[in-house]
Amino acid sequence: MVGTRKFVVGGNWKMNGNKKQIGEILDFLKKGPLNKDTEVIVGVPALYLEHVQSNAPEGVMVAAQNCYKAEKGAFTGEISPQMLKDVCVDWVILGHSERRQIFNECDELIADKVAFALENGLKVIACIGETLEEREANKTMEVVNRQTAAIACKVKDWTNVVIAYEPVWAIGTGKTATPAQAQEVHKALREYIAQSISPDVAASIRIQYGGSVTAANCKELGSQPDIDGFLVGGASLKPEFVEIVNARQ
Ligand SMILES: O=C[C@H](O)COP(=O)(O)O
């Protein structure tokens, strides 16, 4: 199935960066060179979305790191898909484990947000993944399938969805899933999608791996047949992000 799905690498800056640091990141992205066969998306703090949208090199797309499930109203601190579209942002990251864990976002809220974002013309990176406790209790696929099923209850057209599998225990810890561990989950998830959604969606949907991806481990991870890209945190702030974008040649 590799070859039919375009490799897609996202850099999730999280709550990092200021104007100076963002200028440095844009400089190394401009310098590249970035593989033209790979889609590149940077997930930017809301405050800087327009600045990055206006200054990113051609071909680098911009994502918000969150948005709400309503167009407008009394939702202090939130932004809507319509607002993102208004400033020409086409992508949003939803359901990141930090949103789930720190901000108590549940499967249902995330599914509502994914559905609303898609209905309003955004493309979505939808994040799923198990905690260390869940993995050690052999519940990885139960959790990952449940998180996917919650989204599937509200989303029928998966064309504009990328799934990011991010084991929580590997995020920002330096503990990467081995290529075999990541491939095992990606393959099982694709099989689950084939059974529970459709074989066509399973064949076409891109599943990124996220969790301590670096220049040192990206090539081996990226050569796994069911890994279609990465969602990168810490390393997306550094020049090595270019090497990660170019992991699949
Ligand atoms: O969204 C990105 C993930 O949380 C991975 O972060 P990390 O690469 O710093 O482990």
Image (cartoon, rainbow, N blue to C red):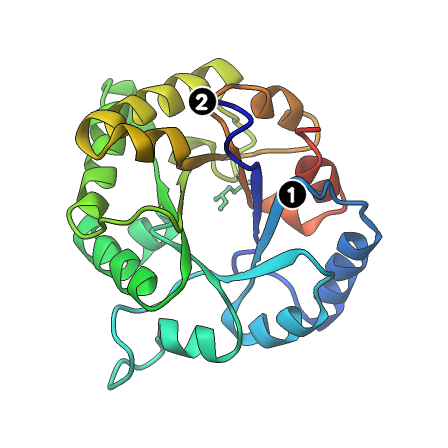
Q: Specify the label residue 172 is tagged with.
A: none
> Residue 12 location, x and y as percent?
54, 52
Q: Nearer the viewer, mark 2 or mark 1?
A: 2
The quadrant where residue 94 appears:
bottom left
The quadrant where residue 152 appears:
top left
Q: Would you name the residue on which mark 2 appears? A: 182
- Residue at image position (38%, 50%) is 98
Q: Would you name the residue on which mark 1 appears? A: 235
> Residue 196 location, x and y as percent?
18, 31
Q: The residue tagged with tag 2: helix, strand or loop?
A: helix
| Quadrant of the drawing holding the C terminus | top right
> Residue 180 location, x and y as percent?
48, 13
Q: Can the viewer see residue 104 in this picture?
A: no
Q: The residue tagged with tag 1: helix, strand or loop?
A: helix
Side of 63 where 244 appears, left or right:
right
Side of 114 where 180 appears, left or right:
right
Side of 192 where 42 appears, left or right:
right
Side of 158 where 9 appears, left or right:
right
Q: CA distance from mark 2 to mark 1?
A: 18 Å
- For mark 2, does the 10 Å Cα neighbourhood hold few (<14), some (14 to 19), or many (20 or more) residues? many
- Residue at image position (21%, 59%) is 112
- Residue at image position (52%, 18%) is 179
Q: Nearer the viewer, residue 120 or 69?
A: 120
Q: Is mark 2 within 8 Å of ligand 1?
A: no
Residue type, numbered disc 2 = Ala
**Among all residues in the image, which is located at the extreme bottom?**
74
Sequence-earlier tag: 2 or 1: 2
Residue type, numbered disc 1 = Ala
- For mark 1, does the 10 Å Cα neighbourhood hold few (<14), some (14 to 19), or many (20 or more) residues? many
- Residue at image position (65%, 43%) is 235
Q: Nearer the viewer, residue 156 or 53?
A: 156
Q: Is mark 1 within 8 Å of ligand 1?
A: yes
